[in-house]
Amino acid sequence: MITNYVFVYTFVSSSRDIIHLLTVICGCDPLYYCDIVVGTGNSTYNEVNCELTPKMMFRLQGARACFRRLFHKVPVTCDQVLDQLRICSAEDHVFDVVGKNKAKLNVDHVSLAVKMLWHFQKEKPDMLRTVHLIKNHPQFLTLRVLAENKIALMDDFMLVDLLYSFLRLNVDPHDSLVQQLVSEAWLRLDKLPLPCLSKFAICLSDQQLQQTTLMGHITNIVDQKLSSIDEARVLTTLLISVSSLVSPRLRDALISRADHLMDKNNPFDYNSARRVVQFLRNMKYSYRPLLEKCNQILLRNIPRLDAENISIFIGLYQSLQFNNCDFRLAVKQRLMELIDSSTDQISFTKLFAALAPISSPEIRDRLESTALLLADEFSAQQALAIAETLEEIQSRNLSLISKIVSVIQRNLDVYKPMEVGKITQAMYLLHYRNPEFFTNLRNILVKFLERSVFPYEVAMLTRVLSTLPSPRLEEGVISRVDAMVSQCSLNDLSSISTALAKFARNEPSYRHDTPSRYLRLLQRLNRCARERLQTAERLDPLLDELRYISGDWFEEMLLEETMATLQRMMDQVNWTNMPELSLFLYRTNHLCAPLMERIADVAIRDIDKIHHYTTYATLLAFSTLNYDSEKADELYNVCIQRLTPHIGSFDPHLLVLLAHSLAVADCFPEELVREIFSIDFLGKLDAQLETLSYVLNMRTRMRLMELNRAVCLECPEFQVPWFHESYCQMMQKKGSGISPVQKQIHKMLAEVLGGIKFVRVAEVTPYFYTVDLECILDKQLQPLPYSEPSTLQISDEGKIHWSSSSLQNIRNELPPGAQRIAINFLDFKSFCKNSHHIKGEALMRKRHLEILGYRVVQIPHFEWNSMELSTLDAWKEYLKKKIFTELLP
């Protein structure tokens, strides 16, 4: 055998590809090859130390010319400058070649040199890049001048590649070179190949030109040529660039094409999946089928992702309100693996932001300890990211918070308005105490507010400013808010009104008279909001504005007007916006029969188009608000049929919430119940709960308990065990309260029944319902005394202290014909906001108490607090009627 050094002149960059290439040509086993040294650059010499026979060498030499034509598409004649550039291994080598050959440089040389400069930078971590040194190098100026002079000689690919590379090397977008390149590309726009078009679109986005006429031209080309785009990378790049100019029709067409290409896409191309998710985020459109396809690609690539990429995906998912248990668990595992290798402040900051919110308390403590050690090295942006994460996890690590604040204080002059707002909000919610720091923040916020020209920025800064102590609001701020309110969305107007109301209450003169300056501005806010509702013509943008709106101002001033507007647009309700409308009705606690009927009609008609995940959002308003009609019954049936085949694909926590919602409506699909109460499912749910926020974690646990209780009481045939005894005891021991009204009813009821021994307060039933008041009547409806006094102690503040015996739920046997009476006071939370219509959970509670053997008496707040019951005698007579008259057969 003869050892030979073979230089393969190719674009191939991996050793495996080189081995395969040589195997095909030489006809020998790949194991013959060894010591492969892969070069760098776009076109490289790759050195392969091989053992080849003379016959193999002959075949290889015969293929040399073919190699050059196939991989370079250039003449066989040697270009020494080009060859010298190709073997460069660093930026200095490139500049040396450029400096020695200035007179010889043609357009190919310039193009390759610039691309290699960016290639070397791209391979380095962000903190090690030296773009500023390249930009200031004398030979870089030579390349820029030559490039600008040779634009007309460039082909399409070279033109766009050069523009891309120069922008990545931080050449100013206003530089004449960039302007000339953009102008030339615009002239060729209609003829640019699609890969060139997508890269050019990236360049325009880099220059903040997403909403220009030029990008509109690109959007039109994409619309015309959409069916011919066959590469996911090309399409997804264009998706991001044109997202701000896309119509609903084109949006749907783009999603359809992306859906098709993702099926054929390389399963390891997670960047295309990321861009699709980013496009959906930009469009504020959570198209579940496509999201799930992208999520499957991401799951395959989790082992390859670093903390930065994972952090990006988590942020995109949160924006789209897309939760996936498998993704969160896989991400958590991967981030845990990266802890030991994330030792610099850049990688650690990304790791901390991604892992801390989904990790256990032990891991959080470890992360916070590391953050404390690195805190002095954090940049302004890194300190902000840590602060926001500390707010999210509700950290109480005062040492770390103080360290982060010291870094932030040093960099306050570099933060943008929204960033200062985020810092203020984070420190306020973390209960950080530093008057001097907050005074500085307030002064900066006021300066930003007085010159802000963005409505969303004015709203956010005003809201944040209201959290800080201040005797009065500056006139400049009031003037700026007054100038911007006509441009604000409903959500922004709601934020501003809440802040202004708070300022007005804090005004020293508020107790005497509402300051006129606040009153006039609030009145203007009301007018602007009503005009916005009255002139609204499209349902989708309106729902987008209403998505996060809340607060007393909206409920008192705008809710009825909003409902009238929604009914006016009722014909625009379709299967895509119907879940969002249902969620709005649920959030506002407002029962509107026409809208509910419309939602039911659309859902029943288009149930096959509705993603099974959205059945929860669709049904939530119906079950919570206790809307009962023939169409509602049909809606429950079709939704159960739609979701049943997909039970296994639901996130565990969402399946629990969905099943609880159905249970409230007295629906218990057997397959759904058996799935939730299986050992495998409960194990997966436990694992997922560890990654959820505290609020969602506790809500899911409570709903699982309530579902367990409902199934045990209403569906004993399913033989589901009651396994929440310890959980309920733990929740009871945390303490609960009794309201002044309940104490008042307790006292009066004792007088009505003949003494305190005839009534018990806050009695615990089997399955841990707490009855406000309980008494026992014999078969003649005469009260019976309790043989044992109540074991509960109630403090002056209304707190209930549970003794150990009270939790044992001792219940005496009743005499024949006697019955237990449960008296429950129903406050406003038990009714729909706009009527006396009782809500679903209050009815479910009544059903369950009746199953437990109680006769249930409900005292609505609007009856107890009515003008008719304004005297003690009237209240007592009311209680007598409720207990004795209404219970008669």
Image: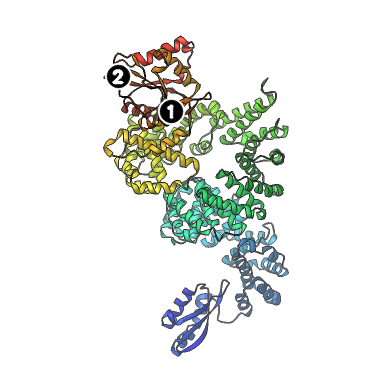
Question: Looking at the figure, which quarter contains the C terminus?
Answer: top left
Residue 151, image x and y in percent?
64, 66
Q: Toward which corner of the image does residue 169 lie, by quadrant?
A: bottom right
Q: Toward which corner of the image does residue 671 lie, by quadrant?
A: top left
For the image, the number of numbered tags is 2
Residue 422, image x and y in percent?
62, 43
Q: Residue furthest top?
A: 873
Q: Is residue 3 above or below residue 314?
A: below
Residue at 58% from the left image edge and 61% from the top image edge: 188
Query: Can residue 827 be seen in this snapshot?
Result: yes
Q: Nearer the viewer, residue 358 or 638?
A: 358
Q: Earlier in the sequence, mark 1 or mark 2?
A: 1
- Contact, CB < 8 Å: mark 1 with mark 2? no
Label 2 Cα crowd, 10 Å radius (few <14 / some 14-19 / many 20+):
some
Q: Toward which corner of the image does residue 152 lie, by quadrant?
A: bottom right
Which residue, given by chain and number where applicable, does mark 1 sit on? 592
Q: Amino acid at mark 2?
A: Ala
Residue 410, image x and y in percent?
71, 49
Which residue, given by chain and number where applicable, does mark 2 sit on? 818
Camera-side mark, 1 or 2: 2
Q: Nearer the viewer, residue 118 or 711?
A: 711
Query: Can residue 574 be seen in this snapshot?
Result: no
Q: Nearer the viewer, residue 358 or 305?
A: 358
Residue at 68% from the left image edge and 69% from the top image edge: 143
Secondary structure category for the residue under label 2: loop
Residue 43, image x and y in percent?
56, 74
Label 1 Cα crowd, 10 Å radius (few <14 / some 14-19 / many 20+):
some
User: How far is disc 1 from disc 2 in space, using C-alphas?
Assistant: 42 Å
